[in-house]
Image: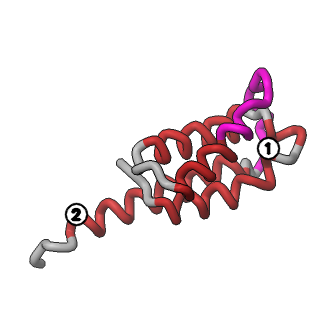
Amino acid sequence: MSADLPLIETTWNALHPFVREEKCSACECLQGALVELKLALDELPEGPEQVRLLSGIEKAMRVGAPHACLGCEPCNPGNVLADFYREQLATAAQSCCDGCVA
């Protein structure tokens, strides 16, 4: 299921503050979300915005050894990723049903 560039950028902007937080930067929750964004970007055609986002995300992924989830409540990177998935599903359902007759 692919995502569009604006959704990926919105999600990256929501995750970016956690990249700067020491406890979050190497957390598997944030790193997993970054991997999902990278995979979504890899599905899109190459262009200046795609390359820019990919570069920033790949840089954020180079933090050394990731650590396990610290059990933060709420897990903000996890919540951002869940929102990304929900939006992907909503977009896919909408585009699938655009030609449907009810």
- In the rendered structure, the answer to whether residue 32 lies left or right of residue 25 reads left
Q: Alpha-carbon distance for marks 2 and 1?
A: 36 Å
Q: How is the image coloured?
A: secondary structure
**79 and 4: which one is in front?**
4
Q: Residue furthest top?
A: 65
Q: Amino acid at mark 2?
A: Cys
Q: Which residue is mark 1?
A: 72
41 is within the stretch colored magenta: no
Q: Nearer the viewer, mark 2 or mark 1?
A: 2
Query: In the figure, is residue 87 to the left or right of 97?
Result: right
Q: Nearer the viewer, residue 97 or 12?
A: 12
Residue 53 lies, with reference to residue 92, above or below; the image says above
Q: Count the labels in the image.
A: 2
Q: Which residues are magenta?
A: 58-73
Q: Secondary structure at mark 1?
A: loop
On the image, the x and y values in percent for residue 9 come to 59, 60
Q: Residue furthest left?
A: 101
- Dot 1, how many residues are within 10 Å of its Cα: few (below 14), some (14-19), or many (20+)? few
Q: Which is more toward the observer, 6 or 85?
A: 6
Q: Which residue is drawn at the image coordinates 65% and 55% (left, top)? A: 12
Q: At x 59% / y 45%, what residue is drawn?
A: 54
Sequence-first tag of 2 and 1:
1
Determine whether label 2 and label 1 are within 8 Å by CB: no
Prevalent SS, magenta region: loop
Q: Residue at x 29, y 63 (%)?
A: 93
Residue 27: x and y, percent? 76, 34
Q: Is residue 35 above or below residue 86?
A: above
> Are there few (<14), some (14-19), or many (20+) residues within 10 Å of tag 2?
few
Residue 98 pos. (x, y %): 21, 73
Q: Which mark is residue 96?
A: 2
Amino acid at the residue labelled 1: Cys
Q: At 62% across and 41% down in the image, what residue appears?
A: 34
